[in-house]
Image: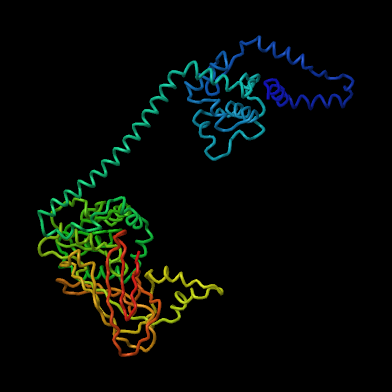
């Protein structure tokens, strides 16, 4: 669109009332006087006249300053008000109409530079109304330039007045970017070197202190922070903490242990490993602890700080963000370590490794870890319907054979609340752990077991669960179980499906062997191998 067309449209908008009046005059009898049309030659002559009279005054859009040219006006807006009009046209993708509306909007609404730069934040321009087609400033020379000419003026302005400065800024920006890339690379190398140095230092310390030698090969302790990020991130969201807090069996057992055994906590220094929302730390403080230190690597600890302050316990409880294997505590030794470290099938997530690390580094002589005793049990399951739903289902899926899917289904341990009526044997304890004595190596084990069958049927699965005890030095002992016969917990039970069920008779012994070990690729996951009757299967818990 040419400047002449724009001027003609502007004049048309500005004189709409006059056109209406002219029509009324013609209607009233003035039609005999024809309104002459301007020819192209007359247009050219008019524009030549305007070009010759180049002393038009350009009023700034944002102040009262008058300038003598378009280039000077654009330069003034850029240098004094930090507004690049041609760049805004490109940024907002304005056509000629949009440009005219924007100029009139700025003038009529007294729009500030700051407000103008924020105009597209919501995707709607405040000058979209056709009301802004009417010039706010009569004979505004800013409306008498087309967009192509505007871009040409911009190039001249930038080239003449800002060329050296812009080039210098671009050069500096490029150099800064290159330095940032080099810094990131150096930081990555430094982090890797730091990790290697940390392992070396651990090795030197562990070689000097044989009591900690069990930690040297600890897979969890050796995990880098970035390798363990997913685990701690999962505990950064409130929902998992809400689920645990609403587990009354879990939470009330810890509460009752501390409330009923306040003599154990009176004037003691307590370490809460993996403190989460701080519920155990606050129980300990209320039970009479002199000082409580809560450690957690997940982001939830920032909410925990607010929780502790809200309950006026910040004088007693100190919170530290980080992994217990890496942080430095404000005390050399603690009297008690509390932690809710248990995972599915007790050992899933391997948090007990971190508790044992804390025990070996910080627990004072005569101190104790709580809970102090725990065991894992197995029982036989006979649930033909569930076996049909999960295993036999694949033999005929809408008339198609999909039996190969069993190779993916069976090895995956199932965490669920088991119907207690489907248990068909007495339980057998396969491992007992004393958290004050157990070594890291004992968390991977092989055990033989015998299940005393109580019902003649088919054994379709084996269920695993655990029991927890607060026992040492406790006048009021507390325990809870996650077994299928007890009140359900968020740990539920862990079910190991048997692809081909085993016929069993009431009263017979069903012997077996179980091996529990960490997954070398993911040390927080478990691999469980079951030998039972003539069946052998390895299951993954991850």
- Camera sees residue 138: yes
Corner quadrant of residue 387? bottom left
Where is 489 relative to 450, above or below?
above
In this orientation, which residue lies closer to the viewer: 101 or 138?
Answer: 101
**175 displayed left or right of 284:** right
Q: What quarter of the picture does the N terminus occupy?
A: top right
Query: Residue 416 or 498: which is nearer the viewer?
Result: 498
Q: Quadrant of the C terminus?
A: bottom left
Q: Position of residue 479 (x, y in %)?
A: 24, 74
Point out residue 484 in the picture as x, y percentages from the top left corner. Answer: 34, 78
Q: How is the image coloured?
A: rainbow
- The residue depicted at 36 percent of the width and 30 percent of the height is 176
x then y, percent, for residue 218? 22, 58
- Whether residue 95 sits left or right of residue 175 in the image: it is right
Tell me where residue 78 appears, x and y as whole percent: 49, 22
Depth check: give the residue in front, 107 or 9.
9
The answer to whether residue 306 is visible is: no
Looking at the image, residue 12 sits to the left or right of residue 266; the answer is right
Q: Looking at the image, which residue is at 20% across and 46% down?
A: 197
Residue 398 falls in which quadrant of the image?
bottom right
Q: Count of labels shown? A: 0
Residue 107 vertical placement versus 373 (above, below): above
């Amino acid at each position: 669109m040419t400047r002449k067309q724009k001027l003609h449209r502007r004049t048309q908008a500005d004189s709409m009332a006059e056109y209406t009046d002219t029509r009324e005059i013609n209607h009233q009898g003035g039609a005999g006087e024809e309104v002459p049309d301007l020819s192209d030659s007359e247009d050219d002559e008019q524009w030549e006249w305007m070009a010759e009279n180049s002393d038009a005054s350009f009023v700034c859009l944002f102040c009262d300053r008058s300038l003598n040219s378009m280039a000077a006006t654009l330069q003034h807006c850029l240098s004094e008000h930090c507004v690049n009009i041609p760049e805004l046209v490109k940024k907002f993708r304005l056509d000629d109409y949009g440009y005219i509306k924007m100029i009139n909007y700025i003038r009529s609404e007294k729009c500030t530079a700051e407000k103008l730069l924020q105009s597209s934040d919501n995707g709607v321009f405040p000058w979209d109304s056709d009301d802004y087609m009417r010039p706010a400033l009569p004979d505004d020379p800013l409306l008498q330039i087309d967009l192509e000419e505007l871009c040409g003026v911009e190039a001249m302005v930038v080239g003449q007045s800002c060329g050296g400065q812009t080039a210098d800024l671009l050069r500096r920006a490029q150099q800064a970017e290159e330095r940032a890339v080099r810094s990131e690379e150096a930081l990555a190398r430094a982090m890797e070197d730091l990790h290697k140095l940390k392992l070396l230092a651990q090795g030197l310390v562990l070689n000097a202190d044989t009591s900690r030698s069990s930690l040297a090969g600890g897979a969890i302790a050796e995990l880098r922070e970035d390798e363990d990020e997913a685990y701690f991130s999962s505990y950064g969201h409130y929902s998992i903490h809400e689920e645990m807090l609403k587990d009354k069996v879990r939470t009330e057992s810890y509460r009752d242990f501390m409330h009923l055994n306040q003599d154990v906590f009176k004037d003691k220094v307590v370490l809460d490993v993996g403190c989460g929302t701080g519920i155990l730390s606050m129980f300990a403080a209320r039970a009479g602890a002199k000082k409580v230190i809560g450690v957690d690597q997940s982001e939830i600890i920032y909410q925990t700080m607010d929780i502790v302050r809200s309950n006026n316990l910040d004088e007693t409880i100190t919170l530290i963000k980080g992994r217990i294997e890496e942080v430095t505590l404000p005390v050399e030794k603690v009297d008690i370590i509390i932690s809710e470290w248990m995972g599915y099938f007790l050992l899933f997530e391997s948090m007990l490794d971190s508790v044992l690390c804390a025990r070996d580094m910080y627990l004072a002589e005569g101190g104790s870890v709580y809970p102090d005793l725990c065991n894992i049990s197995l029982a036989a399951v006979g649930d033909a319907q569930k076996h049909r739903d999960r295993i036999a289902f694949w033999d005929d899926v809408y008339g198609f054979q999909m039996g190969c899917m069993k190779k993916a289904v069976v090895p995956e341990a199932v965490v669920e609340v088991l119907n207690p009526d489907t248990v068909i044997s007495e339980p057998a304890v396969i491992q007992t752990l004393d958290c004050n004595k157990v070594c890291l190596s004992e968390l991977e084990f092989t055990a033989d077991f015998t299940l005393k069958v109580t019902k003649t049927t088919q054994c379709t699965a084996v269920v695993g669960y655990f029991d927890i005890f607060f026992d040492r030095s406790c006048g009021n002992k507390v325990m809870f179980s996650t077994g299928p016969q007890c009140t359900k917990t968020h740990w539920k039970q862990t079910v190991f499906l048997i692809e081909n069920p085993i016929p069993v008779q009431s009263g017979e012994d069903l012997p077996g062997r179980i091996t529990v070990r960490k997954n070398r690729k993911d040390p927080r996951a478990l691999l469980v191998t079951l030998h039972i009757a003539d069946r052998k299967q390895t299951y993954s818990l991850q």
